[in-house]
Image: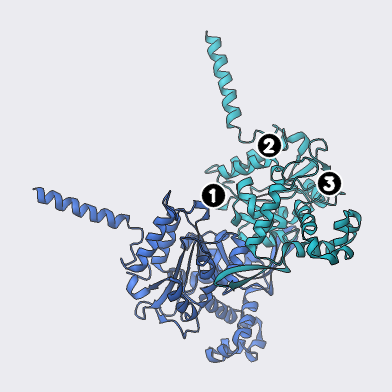
Chain colours: A blue, B cyan
Amino acid sequence: MAAAVILGTFAFAISAYAQSDPLPSWNDTGPKSAIVSFVERVTKQGSPEFVPEPERIAVFDNDGTLWVEHPMYTQLAFALDRVKILAPQHPEWQNVQPFKAVLDGDMETLAASGEKGLLELIMVTHAGMTTSDFEKVVTDWLSTARDPKFKRPYTELVYQPMVELLSYLRANGFKTFIVSGGGVEFMRPWTEKVYGVPPEQVLGSSIKTQFKMQDDTPTLYRLPEVNFIDDKAGKPVGINQEIGRRPIAAFGNSDGDLEMLQWTTMAGAPARLGVLIHHTDEEREYAYDRKSEFGRLDKALDAAAITGWTVVDMKADWKKIFKD
Amino acid sequence: MAAAVILGTFAFAISAYAQSDPLPSWNDTGPKSAIVSFVERVTKQGSPEFVPEPERIAVFDNDGTLWVEHPMYTQLAFALDRVKILAPQHPEWQNVQPFKAVLDGDMETLAASGEKGLLELIMVTHAGMTTSDFEKVVTDWLSTARDPKFKRPYTELVYQPMVELLSYLRANGFKTFIVSGGGVEFMRPWTEKVYGVPPEQVLGSSIKTQFKMQDDTPTLYRLPEVNFIDDKAGKPVGINQEIGRRPIAAFGNSDGDLEMLQWTTMAGAPARLGVLIHHTDEEREYAYDRKSEFGRLDKALDAAAITGWTVVDMKADWKKIFKD
C-alpha cells in the first residue's frame, strides 16, 4: 500500500514535470541546460546577474534559425515564382538575364548572375506597388506555395523547439525580436501568427518607400532602391537603430549572425547568451555548414568555440524539428 | 441622519470620480470627450469599432507635442552648448560660420546659415564618437542644462496632460510610440523614465553608424552622415519601416506631423483619432502657430478643419501645463 502510494506520487511528479516542461521538444542535453540556466539567472530577483524585465531583449535570426532556408531562402522561391507569374507582362524577359534563367529553370546561370542578378530579381518582384498590395501578394503566395522537399506550406516549416523557446522567453518577461537579413515586409504578414512576434518587433532588410496622397488616400509606394541590408555588420546597426537597447540573448545559425552575437555577448556584462543552430540532421531536415551557399556557418562556428557560445546540434539536441 | 448618509455617499462618489479620472489635468471640454469617447469605442468588446489590443498603436510627436520646443528645439540648445564646450579644441571655429555665430551668440547669422549650417552643427556635435559615449554626453547635459524661460531641467518641461494621456492609453491596452523629427539617440536615454516609452518604441531622425570590433569590444561608431529624416512625409515612412502596422491614433502639433496624421486617420477604417496640440497659452507657455520658426502649424491646421481632427487649445483645454 505504502509502495503504491509512493509509486503513484512518483508517477504524478513525472507527469507534472512533463506538463510543466516549457521546452518539451528539446532533449535534456547541454544547450537546453545552458538556456534554462541563463533564464533562471537573469530572472531571479537579487541574483548578481538579475536583469530588469524591460532590458530582457532577445533577438532571433529567421532563415535557418526559426524556419527552413534550404534548398534556397523562402523569399528567393517567392521571387522566382513571382517572375514566372509576371512574365506574360514582360515578353522581353525571354531574352534577358537573369530572367531568362528563372523562366528556363536554369539555376546554374541564375547563380552565376550573382548579387547583381539577385537584386534585379528582388526589385522587379518586390517594388513598384503599394505596401498594402505587397502584403496581399505575400499572403496569397504563402497560402498556396509548398516546399519542394516536405510538401508543406512554408509557414509550417518553422522549428518547433524554437517556437517553444520564443514562448518560454516571453513567459519569463523577455521581449522577442526577429532580426533577419530577409525582407521585413516579407516577414511581417505572418510572424505574429506563426511565432507570436508582432510586426513592430520584426527587423529586416528593406527597400525605400515613398509617401503619396492618391485621391485622398495616403499610400506608401515601394521603390526599386535598397534602403537597408540587415545582415552581418548591418545587424547590430539595425538593432541599435530600431530597438535602441542591447539584447541580452541572440540566436543565429550562420556567418550573417556573427556580428549580432558579438554585439550581444561581448559587452562585458555578466549574463549574456549567444546560441548558434547547427544544421546536422540530413534525415529530418538538412546537414550543412562551412560550404553552404545558403546559411554558411564558418567564421561564426570558429568564433563560438572561442567566445563560449552555445552550439545546438539539431540531430542530437532536438526531439523533433517540426510540429507534427 | 439619512441626509448625512446621502451627502456622505455623494462626497465619496465625487472623490472616487476625481481619483479615478485618468486625465485630471484636462478640462472637461471637447478634446477630452473626443479622446475618452474614442478609447471607449475601440476597447469595447463587440462594438463595431472595436480594435484588438495588438493593433492599438498610438504615435506621438515629441517637440511641441510632449515637451516644450520654444524658444528653440531642445536638441538645438544642446548642439549650441556642445559647440561652446568643444570650441577650445577647434580654434578655427572663431573664424568659420556657422560656428563663429554660435560662439558670438549671434542668432541672426546662425539662422541665416539655414539647413546647411544646422546640419554642420549637428554633425560636429552628434557624430565622431561611439553610441555609448553619445548617450553619456546627452545624459550629462540634460542633468545640468536649464531652460532659459522656466529655469527648470528640460525633462521637467513635459506636458502633464500628455503624460497622463500616455498612461491612460497604455492602461487601455495601447502601445505608445514616439515618432519625432528629433534625433532618436537624443531621446532614448530619457523617454522611458519621463514618458514611460521604452527605447524600442522611440522613432526619430538618425545619422549612420558603423559596427567595429575595437580590442575585442564591439562598438557602434556615429558617422557624420544623415541616415533618415523622420519628419513630414518621412513620418509615415518611418512608421511603416519600424512599426510595420498602421497606428489608430496620432498626436502632433505642427506641419511636420501632417502626413503622420493623414496616414493614421485617412485609411477608411471606422475609428481613428487625429489630434493637434495648438499652442495658445502665452502666459503659461507660448502662443504660436502659422508663422513660427519652430513648430509651424499652418497646413495641418487647415487640414484639421476638413478632416475632423481634434484641435487642443492649450489655454482652454488644459488645467495645467507642467507638473507642479
Q: Judging from the image, what secondary structure is the residue with disc 1 in?
A: helix
Q: Are marks 3 and 1 in contact (CB under 8 Å)?
A: no
Whether residue A22 is visible: yes
Q: Position of residue B51 (x, y in %)?
A: 57, 49
Q: CA distance from mark 2 to mark 1?
A: 30 Å
Q: Which residue is mark 1?
A: B53
Q: Give the chain of mark 2.
A: B
> Mark 3 packing: few (<14 Cα in 10 Å), some, or many (20+)?
some
Q: Which residue is mark 2?
A: B323
* Amino acid at pointer 1: Glu
Q: Which of the two residues, B260 or A152, is positioned nearer the viewer here?
A: B260
Q: Which residue is mark 3?
A: B289
Q: CA distance from mark 2 to mark 3?
A: 24 Å
Q: Judging from the image, what secondary structure is the residue with disc 2 in?
A: loop
Q: Position of residue B198 (x, y in %)?
A: 59, 52
Q: Quadrant of the C terminus of chain B?
A: top right
